[in-house]
Amino acid sequence: MDLDALRAAREQEWARLDTLARTRRLGGREADELILRYQDAAADLAAITATAGPTPLTDRLSITLSRARIRFTGTGANLLSSVPRFAVLQLPAALYRLRWWTLAIAVITAVVAVVYGVWAANSPAVQAAIGDPATLKKLVDHDFVDYYSENPAASFTGEVWTHNALLAAECIAFGVLGLFVPVIVLQNAQNIGIDGGILIAYGRADTFFLYIAPHGLLELTSLFVAAAAGMRIFWAWIAPGARSRGQALAEDGRALFTVAVGLTVSLFVSGCIEGFVTPSPLPWPVKIGIGALALAAFLTYMLAVGRRATRAGQTGDLDEFAAGARCIAAA
């Protein structure tokens, strides 16, 4: 191997790697470039070492690679110091970007649920297909309400939280498939509509809405956001803009999957409401008020804080999130 020729061919790339490694703040594309140049330089170092053994050139390249490695692996302190920025700027800005997708999915869910609810409430054939009169009566009088109190509140909260958090993560992870999210949204709307229709048919509309409203306001909104993120990833493949489809999917996927991290918090809150508030003996106005306050806090964070973060220059765009996701994964 001609080391002088290799040095002449690679010098600018190694210098660029060193510059990136010394840069205090890296955007998403710069972080991607850092990793790619690190891999190339590591291959060069292995080839030089295998051919010529230790040399001043390998020593210099090793130092540059070590400096670059520290940048993308990070440390615990750096990760913790990035949490406030993530919570105050990056996450709300990303949620703000999903506001119209979220609204569209909420409207679609409501329309589908109402259609199924009216159908189930007014069609004896549908009711017969769901169950015999004794089974439906048991559902209306006992099963629907007992569901919220048949297990200890703490374990029920944990079960609901993990189920919903996993569902949110799946919507985002598999959103690229295109059909996964619409199927989940339609199934969820169908289940809500049919349950509501059956209770309405038996004169228990108040029971349905009173038991759904306290936790459902925040829980359903969080799942709408997860579905919106999944569809946004799919849309990146359909309409990538100036980017290639592969680049658009990689960037949007890395960015929006971190929304799942934020949704675990809102879904934990809704799980606590479902486990401890919904079946509690508190007056119903208090229960619904707690749910409404939780929803108001989430929407304020998503819309007001997200809008302010966007106006401050934090677009919630994929570059910032991609860098943050890589730092978290590396740590």
Image: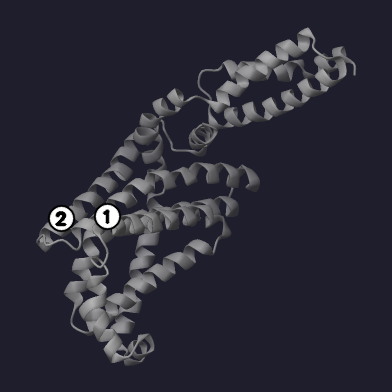
| Horizontal and vertical percent position of residue 29 | 58, 31
User: For this rendering, which residue is in front, 192 or 145?
Assistant: 145
Q: Which residue type carries mark 2?
A: Gly
Q: Residue furthest left?
A: 283
| Horizontal and vertical percent position of residue 261 | 42, 44
Pointer 1: residues within 10 angstroms few (<14), some, or many (20+)? few
| Horizontal and vertical percent position of residue 119 | 33, 83
Residue 194 left/right relative to 166: left
Image quadrant for the N terminus?
top right
Picture layout, residue 288 above or below residue 43? below
User: For this rendering, which residue is in front, 141 or 97?
Assistant: 141
Picture layout, residue 265 above or below residue 160? above
Q: Which residue type carries mark 1?
A: Ala
Residue 130, visible in the rendered structure:
yes
Residue 190 left/right relative to 71: left
User: For this rendering, which residue is in front, 256 or 39?
Assistant: 39
Q: Residue furthest top?
A: 56
Instruction: Give the mark nearer the N terminus: 2 vs 1.
Output: 1
